[in-house]
Image: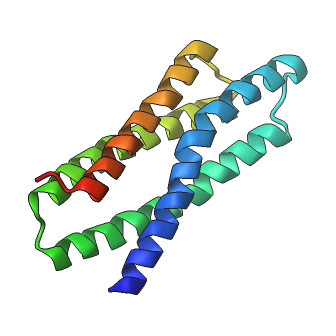
């Protein structure tokens, strides 16, 4: 079971990197697109980071559910699953923003993207609190 935990933590770290970095990268991609009027290397890097981390997210969820099953789904894990579901919804919306950006559509303001980015930080802190404290 230790290997499952190791794989889970590693994939969560990679997924969280994308959750934190991609919304911020969209801001810079938007600025770059405004200057050049085309899809450049920054956009390509942002798109590839999002796509790569999607695989990590799948592995993180599978290994997380495996661990939850092994532990018998205590209450703190059920709350964690709910919080991860919200974070996954945030990630899916990020994918929508990336897909729009790839088409040259940047509807959201820089301020929106910054706030959107920070929401994920609070979600991650809550999830970490659940895992460390196990309050329920």
Counting from the top left corner in percent of width and height, residue 37 is at 85, 22
Specify whether residue 58 is in view: yes
**Which quarter of the figure is the N terminus placed in?**
bottom left
Figure colour scheme: rainbow
Quadrant location of residue 39?
Answer: top right
Specify whether residue 109 is in view: no
Q: Nearer the viewer, residue 86 or 73?
A: 73
Give the farthest residue toward the right. 36
Counting from the top left corner in percent of width and height, residue 80 is at 24, 52
Count of marks overlaid on the render: 0
Q: Nearer the viewer, residue 56 or 136?
A: 136
Against 73, residue 44 (above or below) is above
Against 5, residue 118 (above or below) is above
Left or right for 5, reference 50:
left
Residue drawn at x 50%, y 21% is: 115
Left or right for 130, reference 42:
left
Counting from the top left corner in percent of width and height, residue 50 is at 60, 49
Against 17, residue 43 (above or below) is above
Against 12, residue 114 (above or below) is above
Residue drawn at x 78%, y 20% is: 31
Counting from the top left corner in percent of width and height, residue 62 is at 34, 70
Residue drawn at x 53%, y 16% is: 112
Residue drawn at x 56%, y 23% is: 113
Left or right for 82, reference 6:
left
């Amino acid at each position: 079971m230790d290997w499952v935990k190791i794989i889970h933590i590693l994939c969560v770290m990679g997924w969280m990197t994308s959750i934190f970095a991609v919304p911020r990268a969209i801001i810079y991609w938007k600025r770059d697109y405004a200057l050049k009027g085309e899809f450049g290397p920054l956009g390509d890097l942002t798109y590839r980071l999002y796509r790569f981390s999607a695989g990590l997210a799948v592995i993180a969820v599978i290994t997380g559910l495996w661990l939850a099953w092994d532990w018998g789904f205590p209450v703190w894990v059920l709350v964690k699953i709910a919080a991860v579901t919200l974070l996954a919804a945030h990630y899916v919306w990020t994918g929508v923003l990336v897909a729009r950006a790839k088409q040259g559509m940047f509807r959201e303001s820089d301020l929106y993207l910054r706030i959107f980015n920070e929401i994920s930080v609070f979600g991650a802190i809550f999830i970490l609190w659940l895992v460390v404290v196990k309050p329920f």
